[in-house]
Image (tube, rainbow, N blue to C red):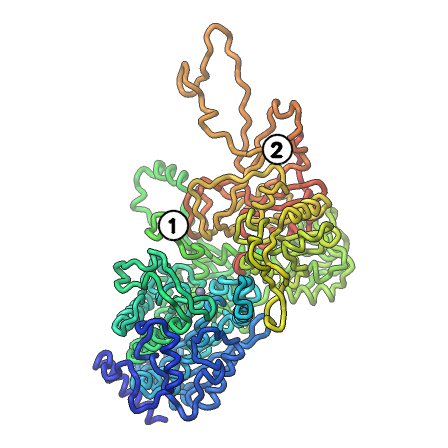
Amino acid sequence: MAFSRLAACACLLLATTAHAAEEAAPGRDLAQPVDEGYTRKIREYTTEPFFLSPLVDYLPASPDVPTPQAVLGDVAGAPGKLPYAADVYRYMRLLESRSPRVKVRTIGRTEEGREMIAVAVASEPLLAAMDENRVRLGKLADPRTIAMDDAEADRLVAASFPVYYVTGTIHSPETGAPTALMELAYRLAVDESPYVRYIRDHVVTLITPVVEVDGRDRQVDVYNWHLAHPKDNWPPLVYWGHYVAHDNNRDAMGLTLNLTRNVLGEYLFQKPQVLHDLHESVPFLYDNTIGDGPYNAWLDPILTNEWQMIGWNNVSEMTRLGMPGVFTHGDFDTWSPGYLMFIAASHNGISRLYETFGNAGADTVVRRLSPDEYARTWYRQNPPLPRVSWSQRNNNNYQQTGLLVSLHYFAQNAPTFLRNFYLKSKRSIEKPRLEGPAAYVFSADEPRPGAQAELLRVLQRQGCEITRATAAFDVPMPVRKPKDKDKDKDETGAGGKKAAEKPKTETRHFPAGSYVLRMDQPYSRIADMLLDYQYWSPDDPQKHPYDDTGWTFGELFGVQVARVADAAVLAVAAERVSGEVKAPSGVEGSGPVLAVNHNADIGLVALRYRFKDASFEAAEEPFEAEGTKFARGSFLIRGVSAADAGRVAAELGLKVHALAAAPSVKTHALRAPRVALLHSWLSTQDEGWWRMALDQLKLPYDYISVQTVAATPALRARWDVIVFPPVGRTAAAIVAGMPRWGNPLPWKTTPLTPNIGRIDSTDDMRPGLGAAGVQSLRDFVAAGGLLIGVMDTAELAVSYGLTQGVALGRAEKLKAPGTIVRARVVDAASPIVYGYADSLSVYTADGPIFNLSNVAGGRGRRRPPEETERPTGRGTADDPDLPQGRPFAEPPQEPKAEPWEALPLTEEQRRNPIYVIPPAQRPRTVLRYGDEKELLVSGLLEGAGDIAKHPTVVDVPVEKGHVVLFSNNPIWRGETLGSYFLVFNAILNFDQLGAGRTLDTE
Ligand SMILES: [Zn+2]
């Protein structure tokens, strides 16, 4: 074993000095027999000879190792063949049992209990040495373990071999990767050509053939249904994973999904140098990691250079092999770190992503490309063809050729990439004295310890080390820059001396027990990415952000995070936190009444439902009891023992105060209402994040579709609250559903489709909410129910007349494509904002603009300024015009209102007030968007004036019930914990939403 490693090292040395070993040209070893039948099928299923390469236009034969045909009954990429995950695993385990070059391990389970695996393929000596190699890679990944000794790192690099991790089919309709990866594993294990042998001898290829296993099995069901009903339209894949669709590839920040946690776990365990994720949406192979700007600002430039190296090698090699349509620049920016592949980018590895061309299934079809897809551009000199007959085999050829070329290049340059791996890790540790900051500090006096603990747990899951100060400490912090207006004042006052002034600092005190996330650790980069602020300039040449532009976790979690630049913070006495961070919890005091402060920590809603039958009341005003201050909305609980409360409080990270007597404060009953979560059959992607949040909190709910609503006239008898999360479609589309021509589209569990119809089912996905559904919702609200609408479903409630006094404004210039903005509490007495201070940060994605009116059907628009400006006439601009020949009549004051308010009623409107909404039924703005200048918190914001000061959350009383409208999305990707409680407050207080309201007198 020692000998073979030595041989391997010599080889590497040769490869790098000889520069791109031409001795290993791609192509078969003539001495090795070919599997003739399999090879014939490869050629048959490939639609043009140039969609093949010398790397995949044959399959070597092996006397011992079965080909994918053993499981598929045909070759990889064959038309009509889409294996379930279990079939893919069966083949990988067959390989493992027949080849000493393959090892399979379980890396975790999905939400629905399906297995996820990782397959390692390499030469026998490499596989046998994986454990000891992992120890070496672990030292390179954490240079503190070798005292940052470069010479020792060089010795480790020379002794080590890299690991290249490939992941397939995270996006379920992108179906080709599993068969491509089955065949790739076979080739790597069996092929004796010098090219493939070289890979096998120098790098471990690690493969997770199916990332979204739950969705894969559903996709195969749908495809099999399509094969069984060849003349019919087939049902769209409405559920990919258990919760979300394409957003399963946006979870690398929040780490809420099992698939992300499992791949991250494998990444942190194996210490691979690359994570390469396979997608299928762009012809023919777009290596999108180089993509386009802006690049994520927290990446080590060494990494972005590595992207260029591997990407351009990929393009040039595949062009040399004669394959058209391979390119690496395009319309993907690398700003957001939410993509699965970014686990590597944010943890000192190399992230890569392929888009190849897929047909969403295994049919061979003619595909017509759009002009922007086939145009020759500066970066795509050999573009895809405008019209092609395309097969899944073509796709498999591209995926495998690209991967083999990448693996070979990577193997040839293994020492370079291993040294870079070390260097990136070392520079991450040196962050405090390079770019900074030195640390992020989370204060022990945080008002929301539950959210703070959750944020710290996310960072722990990311592999970050957390320490806790054992004594109080002070650090200098920069003084916040004054707002523009004030700055002008300062400059005038300073008499032009400002150039000489240094940036001012102020001392910030942190109590003992504060958490310190030191930046002198290997995974400092992910902490910095998540906790820092993002600024995307409106002038950036990139006009189409690929995803969210702002995600600052402290803001979205509603937690204070201090970015400390002064390296003295690293000397603060602190100890490493072992185990998960927990919020302080337990019961203090004694007595029959339990009080829990409302701080909008999400554990509070779980507490209410855990003691479903106990008496809970909400205080309508702040109060003080036995020396403790309680915020408005705090819970007063009776009928729960201190022991039971303490047990649950510990679990939920809550503090309970037992009081001898109830405080004298106005309260109302706080229910544990019956909740329905409403979804459309058009899409469940955005709704999935809401479902996940409720599941994680064990908040009970019924999951119903728009069709259930349409078919249930008496909704109020069954539910108190209907939550309708955003659908991602227009209001009209949600009502209409899918077109009714063609055949019914069943989403049901059957022997042919055993994996679908389990989360929810229907005989026909096409019908939408319909007029009957709209009417049912209207009746539900009128009878005392609460309907919560968010973004497009809020628009639905407004435009279909479920509310009155709310109108939708039109954005002129607004661009907030996933941006964090400031929202201000307008009515602190509303139960919806219990637990919040006067402002909070919310996530918005071009949310609707609400305007309020006191008149039903009113547009609620603000009077355009020109109407109130004076007309042409006598005097100066500020004088009134004076008609001649009679005394001047002073005009009455025009009604004025802020953008979040309705205009006051006029005399004319009150004369015959048919349309005037009675004061108790008028919309109540609870939360509004901040002023234009303060609106942006993080990300890209253009045209802020369109939405500044407009309502963010409106509570609309409708007869006995309420409709609560959200312009922001309060529950998004497990990242917005700070705004969850706006929803939970509405739910818990569904029949008391009028509390604290001051009614208009007119
Ligand atoms: Zn994709």
Mark 1 and mark 2: Cα distance apart in space: 49 Å
Mark 1 close to ligand 1, CB under 8 Å? no
Q: Say which amino acid is labelled 2.
A: Asn
Task: Report ligand 1 position as a quadrant.
Answer: bottom left
Q: Say which amino acid is labelled 1.
A: Lys
Percent position (x, y) of residue 490?
A: 37, 39
Residue under the image location 64 percent in, 25 percent down? 910
- The vertical placement of 699 against 860, above or below, is below
Percent position (x, y) of residue 264?
A: 47, 72
Q: Quadrant of residue 164?
A: bottom left
Helix, strand or loop at mark 2: loop
Helix, strand or loop at mark 1: loop
In front of the other: 237 or 907? 237
- The vertical placement of 194 against 709, above or below, is below
Which image quadrant: the C terminus?
top right
Residue under the image location 72 percent in, 46 percent down? 784
User: Residue 854: which disc?
Assistant: 2
> Mark 1 highlights which residue?
504
